[in-house]
Image (cartoon, rainbow, N blue to C red):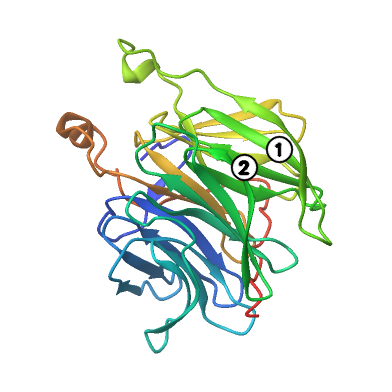
Amino acid sequence: MDSRLDIQALPIAPSLLGESPLWHPREQRLYWCDIPDRRLNCFDPESGRHQQWSFGTEVACCAPLDQGGLLLALRDGLWRFDPAEGTRTCVSVAPYNGAIERYNDGKADPQGRFWVGTIYEPRDAARAALYRWAGGHLGRAAGDVTVSNGLAWSPDTRTLYWADTPAHVIYACDFDAEGGALSNRRVFARFSPRDPDQPIESYGGRPDGAAVDVEGCYWVAMFEGARILRFAPGGELLQTIPLPVRCPTMPCFGGPDLRTLYITTAREKRPAPELAEMPLSGCVLHLRVDVPGLPANFARSS
């Protein structure tokens, strides 16, 4: 624990690769995915109850559905999932070659469209893409990235943020809320890659998942950088939050006042000395912050 920031971990076993934390606005519970373990998790802070559901392939991200249940992005497609019954129905087959590509980061926009990017697993070319699911149809919205991450919208919905993790870059795009079109893609923030001989302790990390607060500031997890960064809407770095883990993956705002910052983290394939030094790796961290976040948007069921 960092006593100055009072960073704590949920009292449950760590994930291999925790991702896509979601504070459900109606249920007041936290969901997150463990991608390689193929599990969806749910934690109720009020009761302390922890639930898990297992799947036959990787589950990358989730969003609440307006008519109840969750929308899940698995390697093989998009699924409507009922946590109460444990049942699921496929709503869209994956549009890519599942042997080398899978879904990764995804969220619903304020109009109920579900946006989900992919990861091109060979990572030797920018062949991943960003897709938009709306009205029961899936369409390609953007491309030319290797690992799609960092999705978030500004409070006025005029800007969509999107990151390419291996490229060490976060983009901002003009967003047409009515039609869902993207334009004017530009660099919002760029980071230095790690040099081959650079000690990991001096490496700042690369942008992974993100969230936006009510002031329009962008909070991003820096994978291998052991920190969360908060950027102003204009791109100025406002705050750095050091973390007791090397690999944070994504923040989200939760709690009744949306002032609890939850952060998923990873421990998969990390060196043993690092895990011994940072035993909270893989845990869901949480801390209180001054500025509330934006609530999660609901995806439209059809």
* Label whose residue precedes the other's in the sequence (1 or 2): 2
Is residue 210 shown to the viewer in this render? no
Q: Which mark is residue 110?
A: none
Query: Could you tell whether 148 is left or right of 18 in the image?
Result: right
Q: CA distance from mark 1 to mark 2?
A: 6 Å
Query: Could you tell whether 92 is left or right of 87 in the image?
Result: right
Residue position for label 2: 162
Circle 1: element type: strand
Circle 2: element type: strand
Q: Which mark is residue 172?
A: 1
Is residue 298 depicted above or below 283 in this figure?
below
- Residue depicted at x 18% and y 35%: 276
**Which quarter of the image is occupied by the N terminus?**
top left
**How would you rate the neighbour count of disc 1 (Cα within 10 Å): few for under 14, some for 14-19, many for 20 or more?**
many
Q: Position of residue 204 (x, y in %)?
A: 46, 22
Q: Position of residue 5 (x, y in %)?
A: 48, 38
- Residue depicted at x 41% and y 19%: 203
Is residue 278 depicted above or below 76 in this figure?
above
Is residue 250 shown to the viewer in this render? yes
Is residue 285 depicted above or below 257 in this figure?
above
Is residue 22 depicted above or below 27 in this figure?
above
**Which quarter of the image is occupied by the C terminus?**
bottom right
Residue 2 location, quadrant: top left
Q: Position of residue 247 (x, y in %)?
A: 37, 37
- Residue depicted at x 34% and y 12%: 198
Badge 2 amino acid: Trp
Circles 1, 2 touching at the beta carbon (< 8 Å): yes
* Between 278 and 184, the one nearer to me in the picture: 184
- Residue depicted at x 42% and y 28%: 225
Q: Position of residue 155 (x, y in %)?
A: 77, 52
